[in-house]
Image (cartoon, rainbow, N blue to C red):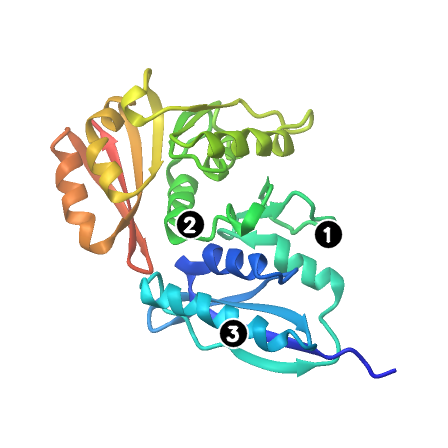
Amino acid sequence: MDPIRWTQVTLQAEIEGVETIKAILLRRGFGEVLVTRTFNEQGMRWFEAQTFFVQDDGQKEHRQKLEEDLWHLRAFNLCAISELQTETVLTLPDRDQRQYLSDVCYVTDKVAVIAADYHGKLPAIKIPIFQHLSDAFGTGLHPSTVLAMLALEKHLELGQTVMDVGTGTGILAFAAAKMGASQVDAIDLSPEAIAEAKRNLTLNCTLAVPLDIRFWRATAAELVGQYDLVVANIPFPSLMRSANHLTKAVLPQGKLILSGFLAQEKIEITNTYQAFSLEKIDEIDDNQWITQIFIKR
């Protein structure tokens, strides 16, 4: 019997596209999508992904549909994407290695997002966050999430209260709780996101690791109460509309972390929030994405 031949598909893209590209590959029937590395290219952060399919009568259609999907992504200018690279291989990487690369996503040096169904050896990481990675989303690898996480690592103090606005699947909320926040509240406009965050809570909150986190559906305009630290990883228009509400949610001498906007929008963000008696104390960037940190005097 002839050995099974596989086509190994490799592509590279700017890190903003990681979740979208993984989702496309999974929906096209590729069972495993491996993020094999991240790297810098001309000052921008990129990732490399690999997947595999059996060489059979449908392989040309496989590649053609994938090329069409990537063409549409390029047309919408989501991110820079390389051409597909393919080669024939007779063996796949070790199964444990494939699962590790598919199911473990390093957000920062201290934080990793791990798929709920991962059964391999856990990474030696300070803060593991377990997630149901449906359709590849919720990996935490988008620059706006990475920057917000770095800001939490730097500015969150032990025992503080936290509000996470636009929580999504709950990554930042879980990270804040595991970094030592005494209480974390988290809101999102999407009922689907809140349902997913609550589902992920059962993975992260155990008898050994109790977490005080509350998720509910709401907008920034519906916030009540004040917190030591508020983090909002939401799009630029939402940040602009919510400036007054987000500022009110911060206690005096508390901090506000804003993420989800681009370099060309940062001056407008800075001016808008400083008009509400906030002082910008820090700023970090990644792939033209910006996160700013303010303190309420």
Q: Quadrant of the C terminus?
A: top left
Residue carrying label 1: 121
Give the quarter of the figure containing the N terminus: bottom right
* Horizontal and vertical percent position of residue 179: 50, 35
The location of residue 206, given as percent across then percent down, is: 67, 27
Give the residue at mark 3: 64
Give, as a three-letter code, the residue at label 3: Gln
Residues under labels 2 and 1: Cα distance? 24 Å
Position in image of residue 130 (x %, y %): 61, 41
- Amino acid at circle 1: Lys
> Mark 2 vs mark 1: which is more N-terminal?
1
Quarter-of-image position of residue 253: top left
Please rate how many residues cluster around mark 1, counting C-alpha atoms within 10 Å: few if below 14, some from 14 to 19, many from 20.
Answer: few
Is residue 184 found left or right of 218 in the rendered image? right
Secondary element at tag 1: loop
Q: How crowded is the residue under tag 2: few (<14 C-alpha within 10 Å), some, or many (20+)?
A: many
Mark 3 or mark 1, which is nearer to you?
Answer: 3
Q: Which mark is residue 21?
A: none
Seen in the picture, residue 172 relative to 115 is either above or below; the reply is: above
- Which callout, 2 or 3, points to the residue nearer the camera? 3
Q: Amino acid at mark 2?
A: Val
Q: Secondary structure at mark 3?
A: helix
Return the disc, 2 or 3, that comes first in the chain's sequence.
Answer: 3
